[in-house]
Amino acid sequence: MDDWKDFRRVFLTLASPGSLWMLIFFIIPMTFLFVLSFSSKAIINGETSTTAYAYFSTFDNYFASAGTSYLVLLWRAIWTSAIATFVCLVLAYPLALAVCFAPPRWRPIMLLLLILPFWINLLICTYAMYSIFRSTGVVNQALGLVGLGPYEMLNNTTAVIMGLVYVYLPFMILPLYSTIEKLDRSFLEASLDLGASQARTFWSVTWPLTLPGVITGIILVYIPCLGTFLTSDILGGPNNWTIGNAIQNQFLEANNWPFGAALSFILMYATFIALIIRAVVARRSKGVDA
Amino acid sequence: MTEPIISIRNVAKRFAGGVTAVDNISIDIMPNEFFALLGPSGCGKTTLLRMISGLETPTEGQIFIGGEDMAFTPPNKRPTNMVFQSYAVFPHMTVEQNVGYGLKVTGVAPAEIKTRTAEALEMVKLSHLALRKPDQMSGGQRQRVALARALVKRPKVLLLDEPLSALDAKLRDDMRMELTRLQETVGITFIIVTHDQDEALSMASRIAVMDKGAVAQIATPAELYEQPRNRFVADFIGKVNLLDAAIVKQKGETKTCDAKGIGKFDMLTDKACSNEATIAVRPEKLKLSTSEPKGAGLVKVKATIRDVAYYGDTSHIIADTVEGKELEINVQNDSRTGGAGVERGQKMWVHFNPHDALLLTE
Amino acid sequence: MSKQLKPGQGPLDYARRPWIMTLFAGVLVFLYAPIASLIAFSFNVDKSGVWHGFTFMNYVKAWHNEAIFYALSNSITIAILSTIFSTIFGAMTALALWRFKFPFKNAYEGFMTLPIVVPEICMGISLAMFFSYTGMMAGVRDWLWPFNLINIIFAHIAFCFPFVAVVVRARLQGFNRQLEEASKDLGATETQTFMNVLVPFMVPSLVAGGLLAFTLSLDDFVITLFSSGPGSVTFPVKIYGMVKRGVDMQINAASTILIVITLAATLLAMKLQAPNKSGH
């Protein structure tokens, strides 16, 4: 690897487009959002302006988000995401294990089958879920044939959780797969050879050694679940809105941007905390990879 | 007669695609043996070892361990323990936890785990590193942990999968001695898998040479070297000159051979043979001389020295006979001056005593 | 867990355990049944959940539905343009990261992957604000097509190029720098070496990264929804509007087309990447 100082021009040419783009379309907007979350609409000549803001003037937006109705939305986002993430983990771990320990020629096709839906548009996936589970959808029609239903399967929390699992399962499978694949299987063999049962081997060896992948998977699923608004909107309906719907509403309808900014940044803080946790775990288990 | 501790009967491992890793093998291994499975890579030796440990199962046959058929018993229910090629020392546990793991998971009382772990670490001279994590240890130390971890379980049989292959040359020699010493101290059966003939010859009391999933010969190291049963074993163990020969006359145990590129001579052997055979002569059994050697029954041929490779204690010489047969000759450099006293292009006599050669029929 | 193993079965052959096989099959049904039914019903004659006969009518209607057609052409235009720029920026970033060491490199690298991990809605909203505040949102509205889509394209480049950078960087990791030295030793200049040795080596990852960017851009809904002005509707945004109004088989038809395009691009990208992996 060369030192950048020896090739200043080459280095600057290569690094600047990406850096500039990130600065203009990521850092500056994010900073804006951050500043706005501490701002209020400016009062000019006694009238509330629609375009100007008084920057860094208040913490009210954060206090407002602590209001009961928003706490309910936030709390709902936290626990539905937690359940969805847990379900993803419970489903994905055995599947990732199965793919990694399958005969080599089966592995790519098994993995492809599991992660292909990852490439299908989030909206289309959600719409597909909606159309089969609606009261006149295929599932209810099929139940009707055996004299059951129709049941209302949508507009409840279970539907939201199912939708989240549907969309984010591949995000859990991928990191688990890549961690388990790197795991030297002689560790598991040694454990069995030393007299441990399969269950004991799993909890004493497999699980602790793949924990970094588990954490990555949890973060990759939990963060987007927290910020979801499409799934809760289409499958859950207004009674199951979460923080993401509130943010969308503040921007597209209620037009209270500072408040929406504060809500967004609550989500960002949660994200950063999650990333820090992952970094700490990754550092602590560094020896495991070797 | 003692019962074998391990009895492998007609074991085969065939895969769906028609590949056969192990083909109808039967071996008996006695208590207290230091047994080696030796062969080139892909000969099925590791698969066989893993079938003894239970990490793989045969598609046919039986594996008796201590008199009980365990061919399909899971590894955690078998009285065998393994030292893995990669050592497989758990990276998230200390040395002490690694060694105690096998006792802990089988419900041994904590106090006993403590004393037995300490004993095992004492045995491999690692007591001072008990609280280390594996990533702070050298390869040799990790291997000792793997050894202690397996031995602490007091298995009936200890399985070692290429245990020395990841060590550097100096450490490998030390570890060879150490393994032999350990085996004598603990008095349990060791089965080692290796592709390194020196390793097998120097450590094992008996060796099974494997080729393409089958056993080529089971014998003591000396027998394997001096009495190889077939061309493969003769060629695989040590170096050898193989001479294609026609048997022109058989009279009792006296066989008259006509070796291509060498000439006619008589050999004494009780082996039944057809008209064709192979004569095997080790390079150190061939002699060189400048004048025609004298002596009854000596096989001699004129040859041109093509290449001389100097190895310090010996020199390896390649010579071509008049009729174009290539021969390899090892010469002891037993005087400080002159080396082998042989130069390239020199014409010399190569000779050997037929007693030192072997007639191979397979 | 059975006490004894079956002939030929190892203790770690988890993929052959019945309960895992059942789970695998169940998950596949869960993942594919909704999509399969969506595609199947795009050929249904009416919008009920019952099969009433096969027809291509939904496709014909969707094709003639100007709003859908316009949205689809917007989406594809945006995807193509942002793919081109993301590939270039991504490749340059990857080269800089691979070739040079510089101060705060780890921080820079982490920072470059932020758009991948930050919740989409936060990025979407920050861009929406940025475009409104700088006047770009209103400013480009009346520009000539496709320039009226420029905000969305800028936004898409911002979240696509880090993905390209990751893919290209991974490929460069496997490059043997002695090849460069060999090329220079044989008399090539720095530029000739770059063009004749490094660029050909990068090509598969450029194609794979580009296709990845293409599908990401085509699929994006959240960021587009916020960074698009009223006039510039993309395909997912249009579908969202239609979904809010209820089930319509034209949505199924149009979605099927989008799924086919995306999956074709994805499979192509995977195919291009696969042989290189085994090559190392």
Image (spheres, helix red, strand yellow):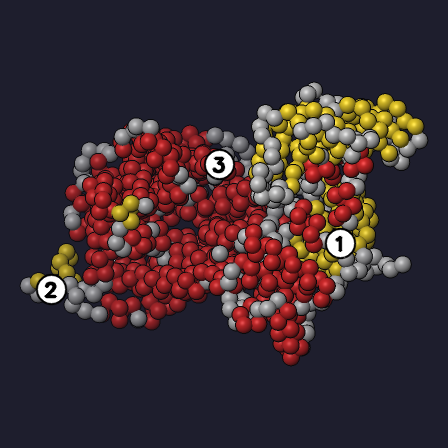
Residue B298, compared with residue B111, is above or below; it is above
Q: Amino acid at mark 1?
A: Ser
- Judging from the image, what secondary structure is the residue with disc 2 in? strand
Quickly name the residue at label 3: C279
Q: Residue at x 29, y 68 (%)?
A: A65
Which numbered tag is attached to residue A249?
A: none
- Judging from the image, what secondary structure is the residue with disc 1 in? loop
- Judging from the image, what secondary structure is the residue with disc 3 in? helix
Q: Nearer the viewer, mark 2 or mark 1?
A: 1
The residue nearer to you, when weighing A93 against B52, is: B52
Distance from the alpha carbon under mark 3 to that under mark 1: 43 Å
What is the x, y in percent for residue C11? 67, 54
Quickly name the residue at label 2: A43
Q: Residues within 10 Å of mark 3 (few under 14, many from 20)?
A: few
Q: Residues within 10 Å of mark 2 (few under 14, many from 20)?
A: few
What is the x, y in percent for residue A140? 56, 50
Q: Amino acid at mark 2?
A: Ile
Q: Residue at x 61, y 58 (%)?
A: B175
Quadrant of the rendered image containing residue C168: top left
The residue nearer to you, when weighing B289 against B287, is: B289
Question: Given the image, what chain letter belongs to the residue carrying mark 2?
Answer: A
Question: Given the image, what chain letter belongs to the residue carrying mark 1?
Answer: B
Quickly name the residue at label 1: B205
